[in-house]
Amino acid sequence: LVRSNPDAPLFESPERMRQALQDNIRPTTVPRLDIITSGTGGIGPSGLLGFDGLDRWMDVLRQQFNYDVILLDSPSALDVADSYVLAAKTEAQILLLALAGRTDPGDAMKCRDQFQYIGSTISGVILNRV
């Protein structure tokens, strides 16, 4: 998304927001699994996280499109604060990703503690590259 005036409303109406989401939802080969990809350019992570409409997007996806689970990918919580801000804005349950043999257990505990501090629920850990 590229906007010439960052202070202007992204969508003039709920119907335009719904249409924009509908236009970008893509089915996959997995039954009942759809995706919205990030695309290229436009609003960076900090712009999206500061976007007040994010909670409305989530509501529209749940209520009008009937999604039971909405999975959001974010950068490493060890590198930037985006994951914490996103978790706080969306009341998310967290799946931590750890790289086998590379993620320091102390760093993983710091991430866990920070997510718990902001009130997020850690649902599990994915150990990658085993």
Image (tube, rainbow, N blue to C red):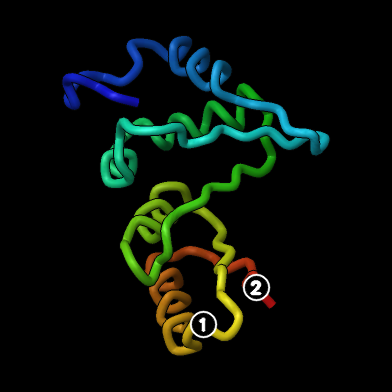
Q: Residue at x 47, y 36 (%)?
A: 38
118 or 25: nearer the viewer: 25
Numbered tag placed on residue 129 in the rendering: 2
Pointer 1 residue: 102
Up-down: is 106 above or below 125? below
19 relative position to 125: left or right: left
2 relative position to 125: left or right: left
Up-down: is 20 above or below 101? above
Q: Residue at x 52, y 22 (%)?
A: 21
Spatial separation of the CA atoms under disc 1 and disc 2: 10 Å
Q: Work out which quarter of the rendered image holds the C terminus and state it.
A: bottom right
Label 2, residues with CA under 10 Å away: few <14, some 14-19, many ≥20: few
| Residue 73 percent location from the top left of the image | 51, 51
Number of marks in the image?
A: 2
Q: Work out which quarter of the rendered image holds the N terminus and state it.
A: top left
Q: Where is residue 67, by image quadrant?
A: top right
Up-down: is 6 above or below 73? above
| Residue 104 percent location from the top left of the image | 47, 86
* Mark 2: secondary structure: loop
Q: Where is residue 78, by image quadrant?
A: bottom left
30 relative position to 60: left or right: right
Residue type for callout 2: Arg
* Mark 1: secondary structure: loop
Mark 1–mark 2 CB contact (< 8 Å): yes
| Residue 48 percent location from the top left of the image | 33, 39
Which of disc 2 and disc 1 is earlier in sequence?
A: 1
Q: Residue at x 73, y 33 (%)?
A: 28
Residue type for callout 1: Arg
| Residue 10 percent location from the top left of the image | 31, 20
